[in-house]
Amino acid sequence: MNRRELLGGLSLGAGGLLLSGCDKLNSSPGFRNILTSAEQLHLNSQRMVAGGLAREFRPDQMSPIFRMNGNTRPGSVDYMAHATSNFANWRLVVDGLVARPLNLSLHDLGAFPQRAQITRHDCVEGWSAIGKWQGAMLGDVLKAAGLSTRAKYIVFHCADDSNGKPYYESIDLYDAFHPQTILALLMNDRRLVIGHGAPIRLRVERHLGYKHAKFVMRIEARDQIDNLYEGKGGYWEDASDYAWYAGI
């Protein structure tokens, strides 16, 4: 998806500001300042409403088909070796600004209290689907690692890349400790498949689909993100000026 399509379909702000998407406008510094202000207003207003909880659905409301978004198979040799062994030797690294860096197996993640939720996934391309996700709450994992008071952001480093650039995403601590933010091991009561982000996928509800990082290999606590890669907080944010917060 290009910048025109993104801005043409993205609704920002408490009043639902609909952006028609014009490359000429989008290249204007003044226009981009308006977008930045609207994103901050959206972030602030969303967190004031109903505790910021995403709607959850009944099992009979789940979509019969849930499309696979983004990259559906990382090409790295290491990742494919893990996939071949059914991720038996895979480990999730949790490091950065933490007191106790972690190296967690799928079994270790399954030992955390598990949360199951049926939510709607909204893709920036314009489609939605309802599915069930289950996994450890990210906040519990960060507490186990002893998150530093200096930490402000949580970065998800993933196994896939595009055009030679590693895929990553980031969120702030509000979303990191949100009860619906989980490291999903299961989708629709089955082990996550590769196309949907195996072995674990971030679910950060009330955000557009590209924030839900797949193939997560490392979780890093940082005090800033403007000095990481291109400095905008995520792969698509860096590559195509997608909104960092991307709330819905």
Image: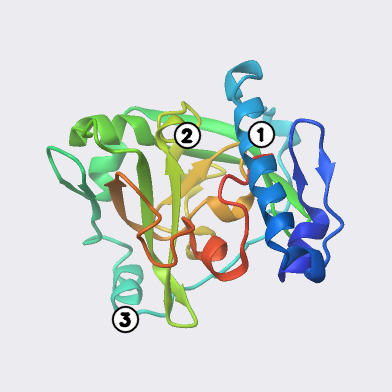
Disc number placed over residue 41 in the picture, else none: 1
Q: Secondary structure at mark 2?
A: helix
Image coordinates of residue 132 in percent, x first then y, are 58, 39
Side (left or right) of 5 relative to 81: right
Image coordinates of residue 243 in percent, x first then y, are 62, 53
Q: Quadrant of residue 63?
A: top right
Q: Earlier in the sequence, mark 3 or mark 2?
A: 3
Camera-nearest residue between 137 and 124 = 124
10 Å crowding of disc 1: few (<14), some (14-19), many (20+): some
- Residue 63, compared with residue 56, is above or below; it is below
Q: Quadrant of residue 137?
A: top left
Residue 100 in sight here: yes
Q: Give the residue at x 47% y 34%.
A: 175
> What is the residue that sits farthest to the front in this orientation?
30
Marks 3/2 in contact by CB < 8 Å: the verdict is no
Marks 2/1 in contact by CB < 8 Å: the verdict is no
Image coordinates of residue 85 in percent, x first then y, are 29, 68
Image coordinates of residue 150 in percent, x first then y, are 24, 36
Q: Secondary structure at mark 1?
A: helix
Residue under numbered circle 3: 77
